[in-house]
Image (cartoon, rainbow, N blue to C red):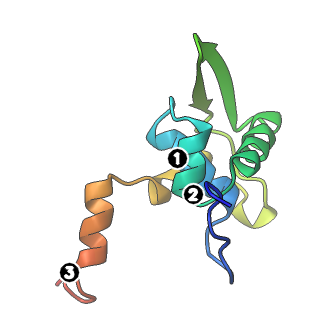
Amino acid sequence: MEGVPEPHSGWTFVTNHARVLAAVADDPNVRIRDIAAHCRLTERAVQRIISDLEQDGYLSRTREGRTNVYSIVPGKVLRHPAEAGLSVASLLSLLVQDEADRGKQVAEPEGAHA
C-alpha cells in the first residue's frame, strides 16, 4: 500500500506522542501528512495523537485559511509520575534539533568529542 510507512518492529526510547510534539515544535505550520512521513506513522495515527495532545492541553490548533497552526504549551508538566515536575519545554529541548546538528552527530564517530 503506497503512502503507508513501514511499521517499526521492536521498542524505542521515544513515544510517538513525543515525536509528533517535536515535529510540531520544529514547525507550527506543519501538515499532518508531513508529520506522518517524518515520524513514520500513518496520517490517521498522527490525527489521533494530535487530538490526544489537544485534549490534555499540551497543544492547541487554530485555523489560518486552509492551514492549521499549532501552539505548544511549554510549561505544561509531563503526565507520568516519574517525570513529575518536568515540563514539555524540557522534553523538547532534548528532542528538537536542527537537521544539520542531527546529521553532524550521526556522522561523528563515538568519542570524537574530546
Residue 78 x/y as whole percent: 71, 52
Query: Label 2 crowding class (10 Å Cα cut-off): few <14, some 14-19, many 20+?
Result: some
Task: Name the element at disc 3.
Answer: loop
Residue 23 is tagged as 1
Say which residue appears at 32% left-offset and 52% top-offset. 98
Residue furthest to the bottom in view is 111
Residue furthest to the front in view is 1
Residue 34 x/y as whole percent: 53, 44
**Which kind of residue does numbered mark 2 sit on?**
Cys
Is residue 30 among the parts visible in the rendering? yes
Q: Name the residue that disc number 2 marks.
A: 39
Say which residue appears at 33% left-offset and 63% top-offset. 102
Classify the position of the N terminus by image quarter.
bottom right
**Which kind of residue does numbered mark 3 sit on?**
His
Q: Which quadrant would residue 99 be assigned to in this image?
A: bottom left
Task: Name the element at disc 2.
Answer: helix
Residue 40 x/y as whole percent: 59, 61
Pointers 2 and 1 in contact (C-beta within 8 Å): yes
Front-most of residues 39 and 75? 39
Distance between the Cα atoms at labels 3 and 2?
28 Å
Is residue 91 among the parts visible in the rendering? no
Q: Earlier in the sequence, mark 2 or mark 1?
A: 1
Observer-side mark, 3 or 2, equals 2
Residue 75 is tagged as none
**Which kind of residue does numbered mark 1 sit on?**
Ala
Above or below, comparing residue 78 to residue 8 in the picture: above
Q: Name the residue that disc number 3 marks.
A: 113
Say which residue appears at 78% left-offset and 54% top-offset. 79
